[in-house]
Image: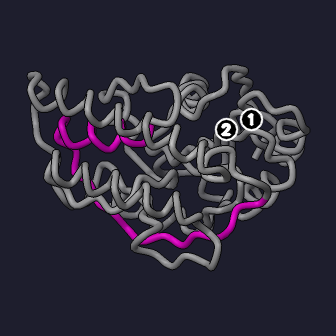
Amino acid sequence: MTSRGRNPSVSGPKIAVIIPACNEERAIGKVLRALPRERLAQVIVVDNGSTDHTGAVAESLGARVVQEARRGYGYACLAGLAALREADVVVFLDGDYSDFPEQLPELVSPILAGQADFVMGSRLRGRREPGAMMPQAYLGNLVLAALMRVLFGFPYTDLGPFRAIRYDRLLELGMSERTFGWTAEMQIKALSRGLLVKEVPVRYRPRIGRSKVSGTISGTIKAAACIFSTIARLYVTEQFGSRGGVGRAA
């Protein structure tokens, strides 16, 4: 992996990883070291307004670091996409070491085999270590995933950050959410645009450091309200607009 985050020695499908990170100096190195780097064409870390050395640590380990000063998960993901070049599959995961980067092959394999366009990693179906999800985060995911099942008819169980998607199909989604609604937007638009969707269990552990969202009740409520608003808005625009196909389970 070069200092610009590219691995020219990779042959076959080009897999790119985008990691939004804000003040993850203690964790980002562990995330990058755990990635199966020999299989990856690009690794992009989006420094989302950090006040610590997150970007410097990531760059020292060969990742390409993109700066996005506007705080927000969607802002960071969009900045990473804007920096992306020549990808076949894009993988998103968090920079706090709560996901298991070693499971990346499990997410991309169905896509490379032509069995899915979009693969969601479900923490609720997988094995969670004690304390990995705060009770408010667990409950919020249950409720919001259930709402999407009711409104859109697909058996999502989670809105987790660890996910893989074909790059060309991702571009078709026209992603626009700037904050917490990003994950729900992708899941809903994948269905309305007719993508073949698969959900796989993933492991989850306590993050390094305190969560900016689920670390407090108020942060969780704010995030849940934003995601609920996104789901409600997309139910109107995607279900009743002329958006083409209907996604299906892989």
Q: Is residue 230 above or below residue 115?
A: above
Q: Amino acid at mark 2?
A: Ile
**Magenta span covers which residues?**
182-208
| Residue neighbourhood size for the residue with mark 1, other residues' Cα within 10 Å, grouped as few (<14), some (14–19), many (≥20) | many
Disc nearer the start of the sequence (2/1)? 2
Q: Nearer the viewer, residue 231 or 33?
A: 231
Report helix, strand or loop for mark 2. Answer: strand
Instruction: Measure how far apart labels 2 and 1 are at the Cα level.
Output: 5 Å
Residue on which disc 2 sits: 44
Q: Amino acid at mark 1?
A: Arg
Residue at image position (73%, 57%) is: 31
**Percent from the top left, x then y, of residue 67?**
74, 24
Residue on which disc 1 sits: 64
Does residue 136 show up magenta in the picture? no
Q: Is residue 172 left or right of residue 206?
A: left
Where, quadrant-wise, is the C terminus in this rendering?
Answer: bottom left
Residue at image position (77%, 60%) is: 208
